[in-house]
Image (spheres, coloured by chain):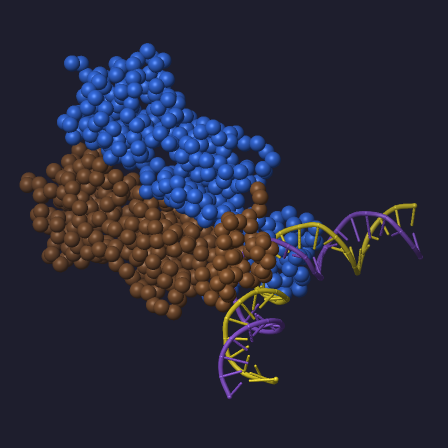
Chain colours: A brown, B blue, C purple, D yellow
Amino acid sequence: MKKSTTLKDIARATGVHVSTVSRALTPNGGASLSQEVVERIRKAAEAMDYRPNRLASGLRTSRTMTVGVMIPDITNNLFPPIVRGIEGFLEPNGYASILVNTDNDIAREQRLMDVLRERGVDGVINAAVRADDGQMERFAAGLPVVTVNRKVENSTIPSVISDDVGGVRMMVHRLAKLGHRRIGHVAGPADLSTGVDRRAAFETAMRTLGHDAPARLVVTASYYTEAEGARCADLLLDRDEGVTAILCANDRLALGALEALRARGLSCPGDISVTGFNDIPFLDLIPPGLTTVQILQYDIGRTAAEILVKLMTMPERRVPSTTILPVSIVERGSIGPVKQP
Amino acid sequence: MKKSTTLKDIARATGVHVSTVSRALTPNGGASLSQEVVERIRKAAEAMDYRPNRLASGLRTSRTMTVGVMIPDITNNLFPPIVRGIEGFLEPNGYASILVNTDNDIAREQRLMDVLRERGVDGVINAAVRADDGQMERFAAGLPVVTVNRKVENSTIPSVISDDVGGVRMMVHRLAKLGHRRIGHVAGPADLSTGVDRRAAFETAMRTLGHDAPARLVVTASYYTEAEGARCADLLLDRDEGVTAILCANDRLALGALEALRARGLSCPGDISVTGFNDIPFLDLIPPGLTTVQILQYDIGRTAAEILVKLMTMPERRVPSTTILPVSIVERGSIGPVKQP
DNA sequence: AGGAGACCCGCAATCGATTGCACTGTTACC
DNA sequence: GGTAACAGTGCAATCGATTGCGGGTCTCCT
């Protein structure tokens, strides 16, 4: 492995001091140098295929041009587009991203945060925060952090999320228009902002419409998984409250709910309507076609990256504490009018 | 942002020299120190919440404990499990991964390779190589590289792939057993090893069975996309060669083929059987259930990481040039007996 | 008692880039 | 003509951790 060329090499080749080379090669540093020298050095650097050593420069300046990206689990379909959105903004701006999976494990999150700090990341984008995440709050005190998709409740950490409230409200109204009055809700985990916010939105929307929203119509999942979706839907149906529609806090829960209906021999949307949230990739291909709230997955990632860069490069400027991106309803086959008994 | 504690801080606190602290804190370095000093230093480090600065240590030792992971596109369902497998091995071993998306763009690949080098990665796992990738070959001369899922043909770069030949052969046999003799093949891109290898395997298997495999039964896709799958399947059907089954080089092509059939009003498997390759997540939920070759997605990632670590830490030891992981057939609804005219 | 090791630990150079300060030569101005 | 201002470069310290080398102390043996 031949060692790569350094400033010193270029200095030797061009007969100037390394500091001069350094200045010639930084965009604005060449200001105090003669055009001729800058030109000569740039040419030599090009010829010698010079690549700056980011470690060295990072050590000196304590800016590594690296950001940490924390994800619960990259194999969860929701996150790749977000990650892609993040990279889509960071990479062209010279940042590299270190990707880590937390598995929603608090100890693991702690450990990975240390890993990122050791590596001197300039900032962190966290798609894995819990709603009540004290350690992330502390962490954010020493390093720019932006949360994406989720947020820490009552926190100053900037977040980029989707319009959870609006999405749920629109969906409830859509179901109501189809005649549904007894709508069940499979809520997301209580320790995730999406879980609590969507649940609150559900209850508000139901009350606003003058419909019942007793606690018995809501079942809270422990995780955003198909298995939990099935379990919760089952529970809801067991309670036998005459539910005609189930609004799930996300698509995976909804897929589980569909499975539960199938297991009971119930048809969707014939017997019961089901809706999801996120519109994850491939959802459109799965029968009966889940009606869901479409979020701008790529854009929330990209926006989070933009905000993080602002935080990192212009700490004095203020950034919005919460950025909410719009959502829309995609209607597919999983909802229909209330079954007439 | 308060600066973190350094070796110097600990040295000052414990009254020893920084070099002593350094030795006390490296696992085997403490060998030449007294137990008492080591203990005292370790305790102080713990108390002061010391985190080594990886930049500094990387600069000094030129080992950054970082690896680059190149993926064509993380939003492609195939790759997240592979990435997860990679991380599953690297992270517990102290490595962090920088993830980059190449979009199968050669110029972009080149640029990202430079990015990784600047950051001093100890090695690279590449899931995005083209079959004839000269620049990656050169790159691998100066830095440990392992390719995963794909490989560079006729190269010395170690690769971890699935049993493409076996998978295709088994699938052809399976179709043959159902009576299919005129089997079409939607081949993968000619510049990817999976494309050429599976195509070759298809032709070999067909010949072995004594079936026809004229060039007209094979259409080569330009990309692994649903759109290309549909286009190629259409082309195949237009040729009107009496094809009764279409073996696709991967699942996305197969999904496209299904779409093409649907557009023509043909049923699957009633009129035509279709098969895929990879068994990507969610495939099981999409009707009619694609029969496909299941690969060990997580394991090829993990194995690639294991091999890379060997390469990085024990350059003298030899590693297998190609590691082939087994595959199996998952049979779902998309294949059936030949339609009797 | 003197010498040989063994054992512990400090010294200082080093990795590569950055940057405040100092220094030299030139220009301009009175 | 002398000096002040300035442009253009070099010098050297610095970021934090690592490591070869050397020096001091203690033990043990002859």
Point out residue B188 in the picture as x, y percentages from the top left corner: 33, 29
Give the residue at the far left of this rendering. Answer: A340
Residue at 34% in and 58% down: A306
Point out residue A28 in the picture as x, y percentages from the top left corner: 45, 64
| Picture quadrant of residue B110 | top left
Give the residue at the far top of this rendering. Answer: B210
Nearest to the observer: residue B270 or residue A219: B270
Left or right side of D10 for B304? left
Image quarter (top left, top right, bottom left or bottom right) of the C terminus of chain A: top left
Residue B143 in view of the camera = yes
| Picture quadrant of residue C2 | bottom right
Above or below A319: residue A326: above
Above or below A319: residue A238: above
Image quarter (top left, top right, bottom left or bottom right) of the N terminus of chain A: top right
Above or below A175: residue B236: above
Residue at 32% in and 42% down: B75
Residue B333 in view of the camera = no
Residue at 46% in and 47% down: B114
Point out residue A62 in the picture as x, y percentages from the top left corner: 50, 61
Nearest to the observer: residue A181 or residue B234: B234
Left or right side of B80 for B12? right
Point out residue B11 in the picture as x, y percentages from the top left corner: 63, 62
Residue at 34% in and 60% down: A307
Above or below B195: residue A230: below
Q: Looking at the image, how many numbered discs can be counted on the residues?
A: 0
